[in-house]
Image: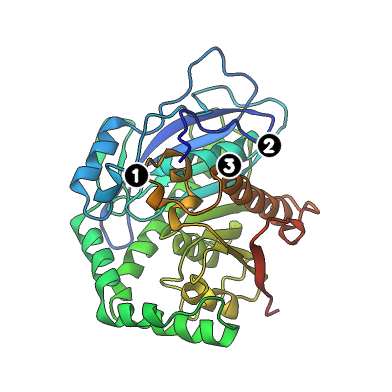
């Protein structure tokens, strides 16, 4: 298996800056939420700086305390060079830059989307990757460490071990027809164990909305930053989530009119029973995952794209395609090909629905990537 000592060079022409921000607010359930976010953005020069640290060693060590991802501790390396630089000046090439959010998988870290965030920033987007309290692990800018809570770990484990879920998983078909997939998805979403999972998804979505509020204050100049008057917010923002982050992306699209569209990468539909997103949505996934998200397109009154990716493992949709040191975690696709595939579909989708470009995900051609379904219930 090929190993990497550096992430690939960004696809776009901009140098990529990265800055970190901490947040604190009172959520709707009256809990205090303390978050962090890495913001990737276009710049014109690396200013002679060395590349940003990938993942803080203290965060990596927290894998020892996390039952969800303990197996990754010996199968994952953080000794890799990024292609972004801390606290650069924002590029002067454009007056405004469009905004995207990235949501990592449950139990993961906001740095796990560094490759796709860097790629998108190199092509002119400002990309915000949020660390969510209780459901992800991260180190705040002020040095405080946050690991996954026992409550979140317990509910994820309970879901994976739930007898009814195990039985349903055993019945999931590869490439099912639409009716079969929708029925299976509805059966999953009505499991009692889903209620607690949905609570965490809703809180993550609330986090995103809070950080979006903060960006509006940065752009207006209410809060001082390099982004004053530079964020292109009136055209709508986009959001992409991997795994457990996918439902968060969909919930944000459903509940926040400031978001124009969203993407789920090998994700499910927790909390989306009966939901019309009213926004274009793209699902890029490995079979038999269509059984876990078919309800999204069935209810959405806007375009929903389902692309099935052969030969991809669940973790291939994030940085672990480059950082893993255990081939059992990987699918059959070359790491660079998988990166190019995910970045291409993501960029084309956002370029079309946010920037109104002619770009189309249907025009992309990767061997073993098939458009299973495109729905629009308008």
Task: Say if residue 363 shows up in the picture.
Answer: yes
Which of discs 1 and 3 lies nearer the camera? The answer is 3
Q: In the image, what residue occupies the spot 53% across and 67% down?
A: 254
Please, which residue is most extreme toward the front here?
1
Q: Nearer the viewer, residue 332 or 312?
A: 332
Q: Secondary structure at mark 3?
A: helix
Q: CA distance from mark 2 to mark 1?
A: 26 Å
Q: CA distance from mark 2 to mark 3?
A: 30 Å
- Mark 1 or mark 2, which is nearer the start of the sequence? 1
Instruction: Identify the element where label 1 is drawn.
Output: strand
> Which residue is the site of mark 2?
96
Left or right of 44: which side holds 24?
left
240 on left or right of 353 = left
Which quarter of the picture shows residue 150?
bottom left
The CA span between labels 1 and 3 is 31 Å
Q: Residue placed at 40% from the left, 42% from the top?
A: 324
Secondary structure under the numbered disc 2 in the rendered image: loop
Instruction: Using the image as rendered, state which of residue 295 and residue 74 is in the foreground.
Output: 74
Q: Residue at 41% across / 85% down in the picture?
A: 187
The spot of residue 125 in percent (x, y) is 63, 40
Residue 11 place in picture, x, y as percent: 65, 36
Vertical placement of residue 8 versus 269, above or below: above
The disc at residue 336 is: 3
Circle nearer the N terminus (2, 3): 2
* Residue under pointer 1: 35
How far from the left and from the top, in percent, is residue 157?
A: 25, 65
Total numbered labels: 3
* Front: mark 2 or 3: 3
Decide if residue 222 is in sight here. Answer: no
Left or right: 244 with respect to 146?
right
Which quadrant holds residue 325?
A: top left
């Amino acid at each position: 298996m090929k190993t990497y000592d550096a992430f690939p060079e960004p696809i776009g022409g901009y140098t990529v800056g990265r800055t970190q921000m901490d947040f604190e607010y009172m959520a709707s359930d009256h809990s205090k939420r303390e978050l962090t976010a890495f913001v990737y953005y276009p710049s014109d020069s690396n200013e002679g700086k060395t590349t940003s640290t990938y993942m803080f060693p203290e965060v990596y060590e927290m894998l020892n305390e996390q039952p969800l991802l303990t197996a990754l501790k010996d199968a994952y390396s953080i000794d890799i060079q990024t292609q972004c630089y801390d606290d650069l000046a924002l590029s002067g090439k454009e007056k405004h830059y469009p905004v995207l959010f990235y949501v990592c998988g449950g139990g993961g870290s906001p740095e796990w989307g560094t490759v796709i965030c860097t790629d998108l920033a190199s092509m002119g987007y400002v990309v915000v990757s949020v660390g969510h309290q209780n459901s992800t692990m991260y180190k705040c800018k002020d040095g405080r460490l946050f690991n996954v809570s026992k409550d979140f770990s317990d509910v994820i484990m309970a879901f994976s071990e739930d007898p009814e879920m195990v039985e349903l998983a055993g019945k999931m078909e590869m490439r099912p027809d639409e009716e079969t997939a929708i029925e299976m998805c509805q059966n999953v979403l009505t499991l009692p164990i889903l209620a607690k999972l949905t609570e965490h998804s809703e809180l993550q979505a609330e986090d995103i909305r809070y950080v979006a509020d903060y960006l509006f204050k940065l752009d207006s100049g209410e809060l001082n930053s390099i982004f004053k008057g530079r964020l292109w917010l009136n055209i709508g923002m986009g959001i992409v989530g991997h795994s457990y982050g996918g439902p968060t992306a969909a919930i944000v699209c459903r509940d926040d009119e400031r978001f124009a569209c969203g993407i789920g990468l090998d994700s499910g539909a927790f909390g989306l029973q009966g939901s019309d997103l009213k926004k274009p949505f793209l699902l890029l996934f490995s079979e038999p995952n269509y059984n876990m998200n078919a309800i999204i397109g069935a209810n959405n009154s806007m375009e929903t794209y389902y692309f099935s990716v052969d030969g991809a493992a669940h973790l291939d949709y994030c940085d672990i395609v480059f950082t893993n040191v255990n081939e059992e975690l990987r699918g059959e696709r070359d790491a660079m090909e998988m990166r190019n595939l995910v970045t291409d579909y993501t960029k084309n989708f956002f370029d079309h629905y946010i920037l109104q470009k002619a770009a189309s995900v249907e025009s992309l051609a990767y061997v073993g990537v098939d458009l299973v379904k495109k729905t629009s219930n308008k």
